[in-house]
């Protein structure tokens, strides 16, 4: 009889332990005791490697600050970054890995339209696990529109909004003949679509277009594209591409003696663009930074009237984060400040806010509700952030900058390019 | 008077011929003697014999030479030349003929034949 | 490589090339069609897929999403471009870099009811297969998928190339295998062939080493044993040949030594009279070098007469021809030419040339000259005193008979006896003198004949005339002995060519002998014509000649009745002189006799045509004597 009881007790004990373990394990799924893992797949290497690296840098500046100051209710935020080289297939692989293996809480700081767009169906398939993508560095439409908008929360204004803004401004100053230089993929297409739709409002259409392949390097020739666009005799060019190709285009256009105003969107990576053009200026002695306009989706980091700017500048100087060794591209030199890293910073700021709002119960199932309930949140910039079940985009503002003395400065007045 | 000249360097033959020709001497024919060619030529020039017995083998001037000389220097009378020699070659005979000899007799000769010949030449009968 | 292999290799290669080519082309064609089909179906599938999945997005005018979608399909191999046209006919998404080709404007407004495939050519870009699919029956728009046909061609090319490569590799591999197999056969065959070749060259070294258990091995073994036999045979033959060569060489060396060491000169010419060989002696004789002779015509060096005898000797290779020839330093040589007889040389021609021996006869000539001089001198020396002896004796006799004896009137028997004795003695002196004269004449004659110092005349002689003259000359002898001479001479005897005086001499001699040895009876002289000669015979009824004597009767100093008892009555040279004369003219002289009954002396003289004078000069020097002078 004694034996029987003992064996039962033993059995129960084992069962108990097992159950506890399971529970703990399950709870770990949600949030490991001390860390919140967030997955990031972006371009750390290659022609667009600068973007991912800057994005990460910006985000990490804030996250380091938060982690140093108690984290999220004591939990540290850990970004698990992977490089996808701005290519969809690695992006998908990385995402699966992040979800399945690394068991991340959410996905964050993804970079690029083609990559993100391809990951969307994946999100849909993991929807039962409440995997969300936060603040991808892309203004494309797919993740802003049904059916995939459900799984993505955007921060920045869309390309559509960016290009709309650019077109409006050009038209206002009489530059109605607008041609588009764009990357031959979903990203470029978004920009193109934005321009076209906006022009359609004025009863106008794109007068000329030229594309380039994603991954084009700065030392490649864009003369062909320059020639094609020039044929259509535009009075403004809207360029929707990455910094290497766009800089090449600007260089070749200016070398051909074409001074037409060229406007780039935020994704281009303004600082990198300038950097390449400045290097070429030193080599050839020509001026490549005239008549350049850049739309941005975050305010200028020069505007120290904004608290977020001040915070950004302090933190990024203080922490000066760089991507982990395995993700550092040998050509990448961290920019002290950049629009991209500022956006990354703001992304992190917003995310932290969201996580904080989740309180003690940091579970995936709460994410949606928490985010959608954010209204007019001030994160230290000039506009407030709002989400809703229908609107998974935080802000809508588009900023404009132009180059002066080798830096992008805010652009208020377009009159200098006005056509009579 | 008819004359016979004997030209021979050998005195015995000269003697013999003289004796052989004695019958002619009795018929009033002068027998002349010469011991060599030179003398003979002189005698011929002087005496002009009708018949000459000429020995071939002589010193100083042999019979052929004398014969030739005689024939080349004709006088009024052309003498009949009988050449005498011990040599019996055909070539000698021809040589004799070539040098102008009229007759060629080899030694030893037949005395009767010789006498007959002389009779014939000189047109003198001995009997 | 074996010839066998070579022969078939060309055929194989051609065959291979035909096969490979055909396969490649057919594969290419099939591949082309297949790929084309595949591309079309691929394109169609893609178009349809895009068409079906982009309805929503297209209706939403979400160009970016469409772009994202079509970008994905661009990754598929063969897809060159994709573009989507919306309901308004505007291209809402495309994948063209750097820009939409102009040709697209032609097709972008195609509105087929169902998936439509066509080919389109872009300038600078190539040929494409454009597949158009309607999206939502065309209401939402159309999608165009462009498949790069040049891709197909590239694929085909690479496939064909790979195939050709593979076939070639296999081919080469098979060739190697074939080569090895053929070699297995041909190698031993080649080895055997080489071996056989070596054998033909009498090289018996390095025998073949083929041990295969087949026909080739058998052949090899057979050849090996054959080779061994051959080797033996050849060794023996070689030995024999070597021995023969050594012997020949020795003989040659010997002959060469002989020829080179001959004191006489040796000259060899060919059938044209061109000099082919001279020996050192000859060169020395003419004080020229060997090279001065070789290759030159003998006429140019030695003159016409020499060339003549060479020519004669070549055409009459069985006879010998001679001439005298002047040597260097005023020496005289005798050249004897003989044709190289065709029996001794295996040749189709009559002869292969002439061999001329030249002997320096200067000393002989000298000797001859001395002999002649001697003869001359002797004859003169002997005759002159003889003349005196005879002459004076005759004179003495004459004087005695004419002047002295008639005037001796005495009855003294002693005186009368003395006178008779004197008479007799003087007659004896005279007759001995005659005999001495005859002897001297005969001796001089015979030595002249033997020395060849006779001037052999050649004249037409009527035999009848000669006989008559001889008879007249000996008539005294006949009268003296009161013997009758019977003549039996044929009429119309043809002429013979000889020296008349000499023939008369012969007949006189024979008649004299006949009279001398006949005391009673008669002497008969006959002359008749034979087939190609004249036969003259003098028969007597004299003492005859014994059998043993008959053989020697024509020798010098042989007299009939050569015993101590008989008085020699002649010189013993007469018949010898007769023989010399008769034989010189090509006739024969002989005697038939019976001891006690009588003897008949015969001689023949050949009848010859005038043209055959050359025969007479066969063995003679006299013709040349004239040239010598």
Image: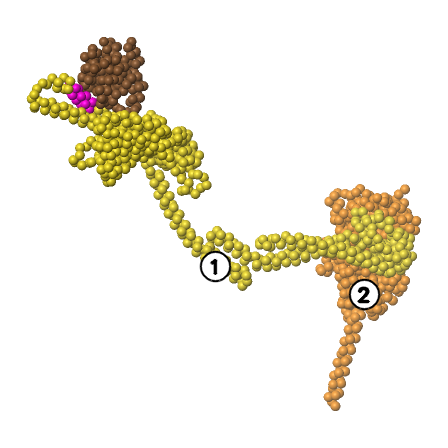
Q: Position of residue C72 (x, y in %)?
A: 81, 58
Q: Is residue C475 left or right of residue C71?
A: left
Do we see residue C157 in this rendering? yes
Residue A207 on the magenta segment? no
Q: Is residue C111 above or below residue C493?
A: below
**Location of the C terminus of chain A (image quadrant):** top right
Q: Residues within 10 Å of mark 1 (few under 14, many from 20)?
A: few
How far is the residue under mark 1 from the one under mark 2?
98 Å
Front residue of this view, candidates A103 and A294: A103
Q: Is residue B122 left or right of residue C564?
A: right
**Disc 1 element:** helix
- Chain A painted colour: orange
Residue depicted at 29% across the width and 36% down the height: C590
Q: Residue furthest bottom?
A: A1
From the image, tell me which residue sits under label 1. Answer: C225
Do we see residue C155 in this rendering? no
From the image, tell me which residue sits under label 2. Answer: A106
Chain of the residue under label 2: A
Q: Which residues are magenta?
A: C384-399
Front residue of this view, candidates A147 and C42: C42
């Amino acid at each position: 009889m004694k034996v029987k009881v003992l064996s039962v007790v033993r059995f129960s004990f084992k069962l108990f332990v097992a159950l506890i373990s399971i529970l703990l394990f399950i709870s770990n799924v949600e949030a490991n005791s001390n860390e919140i893992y967030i997955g990031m797949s972006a371009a750390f290497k290659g022609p667009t490697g600068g973007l991912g690296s800057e994005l990460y840098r910006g985000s990490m500046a804030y996250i380091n600050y938060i982690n140093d100051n108690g984290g999220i209710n004591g939990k540290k935020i850990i970004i698990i970054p992977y490089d996808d080289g701005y290519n969809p297939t690695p992006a998908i692989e990385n995402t699966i890995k992040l979800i399945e293996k690394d068991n991340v809480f959410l996905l964050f700081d993804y970079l690029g339209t083609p990559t993100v767009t391809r990951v969307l169906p994946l999100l849909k398939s993991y929807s039962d696990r409440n995997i969300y993508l936060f603040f991808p560095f892309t203004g494309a439409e797919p993740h802003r529109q049904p059916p995939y908008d459900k799984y993505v929360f955007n921060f920045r204004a869309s390309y559509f909004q960016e290009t709309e803004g650019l077109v409006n401004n050009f038209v206002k100053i009489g530059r109605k003949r607008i041609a588009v230089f764009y990357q031959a993929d979903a990203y470029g297409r978004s920009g193109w679509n934005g321009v076209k739709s906006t022009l359609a409002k004025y009863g106008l259409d794109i007068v000329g277009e030229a594309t380039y392949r994603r991954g084009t390097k700065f030392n490649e020739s864009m003369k062909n594209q320059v020639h094609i666009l020039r044929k259509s005799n535009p009075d403004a060019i809207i360029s929707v591409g990455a910094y290497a190709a766009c800089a090449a285009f600007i260089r070749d256009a200016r070398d051909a003696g074409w001074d037409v105003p060229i406007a780039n969107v935020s994704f281009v990576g303004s600082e990198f663009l300038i950097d390449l053009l400045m290097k070429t200026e030193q080599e050839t002695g020509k001026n490549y930074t005239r008549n350049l306009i850049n739309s941005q989706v975050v305010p200028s980091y020069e505007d120290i009237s904004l608290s977020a700017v001040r915070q950004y500048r302090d933190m990024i100087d203080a922490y000066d984060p760089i991507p982990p060794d395995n993700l550092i591209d040998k050509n990448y030199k961290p920019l002290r400040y950049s629009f991209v890293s500022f956006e990354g910073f703001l992304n992190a700021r917003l995310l932290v806010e969201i996580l904080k709002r989740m309180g003690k119960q940091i579970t995936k199932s709460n994410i949606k509700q928490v985010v959608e309930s954010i209204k007019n949140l001030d994160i230290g910039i000039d506009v407030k952030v709002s989400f809703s079940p229908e609107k998974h985009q935080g802000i809508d503002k588009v900023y404009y900058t132009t180059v002066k003395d080798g830096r992008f400065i805010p652009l208020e007045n377009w009159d200098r390019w006005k056509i009579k | 008077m008819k004359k016979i000249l004997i030209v021979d360097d050998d005195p015995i033959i000269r003697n013999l011929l003289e004796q052989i020709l004695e019958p002619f001497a009795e018929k009033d024919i002068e027998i002349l003697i010469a011991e060599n060619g030179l003398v003979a030529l002189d005698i011929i020039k002087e005496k002009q014999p009708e018949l000459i017995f000429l020995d071939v083998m002589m010193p100083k001037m042999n019979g052929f030479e004398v014969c030739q000389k005689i024939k080349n220097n004709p006088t009024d009378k052309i003498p009949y030349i009988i050449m005498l020699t011990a040599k019996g070659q055909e070539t000698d005979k021809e040589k004799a003929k070539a040098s102008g000899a009229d007759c060629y007799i080899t030694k030893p000769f037949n005395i009767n034949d010789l006498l007959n010949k002389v009779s014939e030449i000189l047109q003198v009968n001995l009997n | 490589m074996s010839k066998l292999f070579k022969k078939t290799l060309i055929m194989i290669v051609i065959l291979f090339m035909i096969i490979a080519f055909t396969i490649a082309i057919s594969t290419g064609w099939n591949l082309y069609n297949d790929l084309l089909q595949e591309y079309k179906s691929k394109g169609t599938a893609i178009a349809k897929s895009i068409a079906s999945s982009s309805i929503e997005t297209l209706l939403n005018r979400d160009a970016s999403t469409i772009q994202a979608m079509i970008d994905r399909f661009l990754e598929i191999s063969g897809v060159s471009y994709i573009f989507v046209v919306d309901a308004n006919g505007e291209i809402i998404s495309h994948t063209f870099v750097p820009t939409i080709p102009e040709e697209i404007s032609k097709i972008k407004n195609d509105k087929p009811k169902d998936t439509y495939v066509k080919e389109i050519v872009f300038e600078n870009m190539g040929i494409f297969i454009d597949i158009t699919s309607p999206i939502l029956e065309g209401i939402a728009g159309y999608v165009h998928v462009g498949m790069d046909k040049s891709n197909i061609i590239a694929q085909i090319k690479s496939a064909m190339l790979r195939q050709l490569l593979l076939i070639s590799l296999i081919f080469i591999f098979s060739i190697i295998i074939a080569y090895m197999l053929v070699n297995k056969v041909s190698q031993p065959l080649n080895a055997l062939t080489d071996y056989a070749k070596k054998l033909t060259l009498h090289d018996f070294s390095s025998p073949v080493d083929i041990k295969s258990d087949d026909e080739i091995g058998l052949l090899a073994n057979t050849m090996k044993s054959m080779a061994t036999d051959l080797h033996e045979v050849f060794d023996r033959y070689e030995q024999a040949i070597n021995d023969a060569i050594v012997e020949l060489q020795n003989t040659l060396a010997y002959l060469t030594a002989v020829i080179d060491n001959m004191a006489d000169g040796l000259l060899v010419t060919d059938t044209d009279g061109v000099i082919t060989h001279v020996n050192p002696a000859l060169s020395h004789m003419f004080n020229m070098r060997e090279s001065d002779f070789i290759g030159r015509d003998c006429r140019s060096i030695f003159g016409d007469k020499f060339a003549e005898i060479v020519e004669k000797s070549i055409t009459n290779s069985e006879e010998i021809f001679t001439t005298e020839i002047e040597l260097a330093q005023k020496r005289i040589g005798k050249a004897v030419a003989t044709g190289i007889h065709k029996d001794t040389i295996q040749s189709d021609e009559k002869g292969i040339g002439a061999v001329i021996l030249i002997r320096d006869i200067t000393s002989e000539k000298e000797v001859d000259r001395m002999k002649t001089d001697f003869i001359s001198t002797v004859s003169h020396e002997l005759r002159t005193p003889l003349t005196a002896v005879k002459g004076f004796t005759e004179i003495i006799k004459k004087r005695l008979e004419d002047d002295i004896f008639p005037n001796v009137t005495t009855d003294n028997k002693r005186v009368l006896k003395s006178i008779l004795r004197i008479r007799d003695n003087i007659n004896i002196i005279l007759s001995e003198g005659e005999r001495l004269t005859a002897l001297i004449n005969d001796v001089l004659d015979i030595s002249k004949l033997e020395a060849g110092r006779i001037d052999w005349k050649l004249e037409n002689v009527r035999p009848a005339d000669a006989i008559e003259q001889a008879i007249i000359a000996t008539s005294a002898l006949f009268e003296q002995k009161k013997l009758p001479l019977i003549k039996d001479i044929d009429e119309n005897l043809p002429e013979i060519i000889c020296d008349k005086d000499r023939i008369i001499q012969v007949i006189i001699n024979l008649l004299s002998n006949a009279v001398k040895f006949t005391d009673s009876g008669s002497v008969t002289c006959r002359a008749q014509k034979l087939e190609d000669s004249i036969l003259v015979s003098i028969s007597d009824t004299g003492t005859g000649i014994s059998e043993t004597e008959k053989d020697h009767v024509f020798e010098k100093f042989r007299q009939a009745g050569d015993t101590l008892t008989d008085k020699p009555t002649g010189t013993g040279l007469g018949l010898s002189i007769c023989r010399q004369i008769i034989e010189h003219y090509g006739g024969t002289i002989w005697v038939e006799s019976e001891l006690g009954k009588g003897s008949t002396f015969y001689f023949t003289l050949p009848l010859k045509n005038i043209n055959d004078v050359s025969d007479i000069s066969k063995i003679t020097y006299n013709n040349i004597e004239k040239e010598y002078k």
